[in-house]
Image (tube, rainbow, N blue to C red):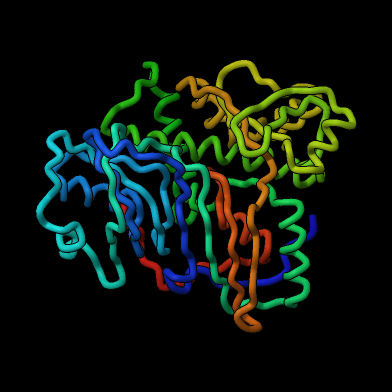
Amino acid sequence: MTHPICQAIYKATPADFIVTENLAIEHTCDGEHLWLYITKVNLNTAYVARLLADWAGVPVRDVGYSGLKDRHAITHQWFSIRLPTKAVPSTPFSEFIKPHLHNGESAEIIKQAWHSRKLGRGTHKSNHFTITLRAITGDKSAIDDRLNQIKTSGVPNYFGEQRFGNDGKNTEKAKQFFDKILASPKPYRPNKKTAERDSLLISTARSVLFNAMLDARVADGSWQTALDGDVFNLNGTGSIFVADIDDDIHARLNSGDIHPTAPLYGTGTPKHSNDVARLYDTVLSRDDFAVFCQGLHKIDAKISYRPLRLLVRLLTWRWVDDASLVLDFELPKGAFATVVLSAVVDELILHSHHDAPKA
């Protein structure tokens, strides 16, 4: 895989990073859950969920959403609120939240529907992105060539920097979290009060390990080809399988029908073996990974698999001027747009005006 070729600034304005959640569901038009399609600007998903809970006078656990969306962006996504009496607050949500917002922040209910169930995490199928890169340095034709390659071959399916927090602080927090668990003689028991934080730190640890294994596959050029002992993922699904490597497997890999995988580390019998197992075991034997591996075993996090390759659907682009490029594409849930951007540019620069995110 060739190296990215330039620098660019992203998120110069919220309109430079637009995310639309694709959630295919037919509402029952009855039930006790009010689903709200909200456009938010410069607000993160969890903060809007808390505002909705305060507005409706319900616990935040009664507010549902499918996925976390970027703060410094314009995002369109569904939320749900459990309202057993169907008593919708008389004060419009947009009025209620005004005292809680700063300049440039907003959230507006676009449409609503009643449904019989709460909106669960991971319900959406994909996200559509419209992203503008600015102050680009680099040759336009070379960038077009790189984008054509991405359109054909995809990109390595890394967990993006958002997973690791500001300046990677979640990684250190995850180490501290597992150090504490390993130091205790007691078994790990999830605490309702800290469940969301714990889940984030557990995911951070698994993401660190996955990215390291993917690094090894990128380094040896095998992130989109088959190695002996690979576990394969059926594109667009959570289905995995093992198979002997033959012409059919090679053809399916080349067509994008299947992808090689790496584990999201945890307990249970690994499905990968042979050369792949030896490669991943070597990666995971690093001293600084021991706390994550041992900690994930102690909490009994179950092993699962994630594809090494990310196909970028519906990718189009247009140059606004010699230094501004608009990208449109769709990614499955769990994929990171910044990973795609980082495959286009050497250095992806976040616009510097951002303050600390609401948490």
Residue 93 is drawn in which quadrant?
bottom left
Residue 147 lies, in percent from the top left, at: 72, 63
Residue farthest to the bottom, as pictured: 321
Residue name at image x 12 percent, y 42 percent: 87
- Side (left or right) of 49 relative to 202: left
Residue name at image x 45 percent, y 38 percent: 122
Residue 181 lies, in percent from the top left, at: 41, 26
Residue 78 lies, in percent from the top left, at: 36, 48
Instruction: Between residue 305 and residue 41, name the one nearer to us.
Output: 41
Residue 129 lies, in percent from the top left, at: 53, 59
- Side (left or right) of 1 relative to 185: right
Number of dots carrying numbers: 0
262 is higher (above) or lower (below) than 113: above
Instruction: Between residue 236 and residue 41, name the one nearer to us.
Output: 236
Name the quarter where the N terminus is drawn: bottom right
- Side (left or right) of 253 relative to 159: right
227 is higher (above) or lower (below) than 1: above
Instruction: Between residue 342 and residue 140, name the one nearer to us.
Output: 140
Residue name at image x 12 percent, y 36 percent: 85
Residue farthest to the right, as pictured: 247
Instruction: Between residue 218 and residue 327, name the one nearer to us.
Output: 327
- Side (left or right) of 187 relative to 114: right
167 is higher (above) or lower (below) than 173: below
Residue name at image x 64 percent, y 73 percent: 318
Residue 38 is drawn in which quadrant?
bottom left
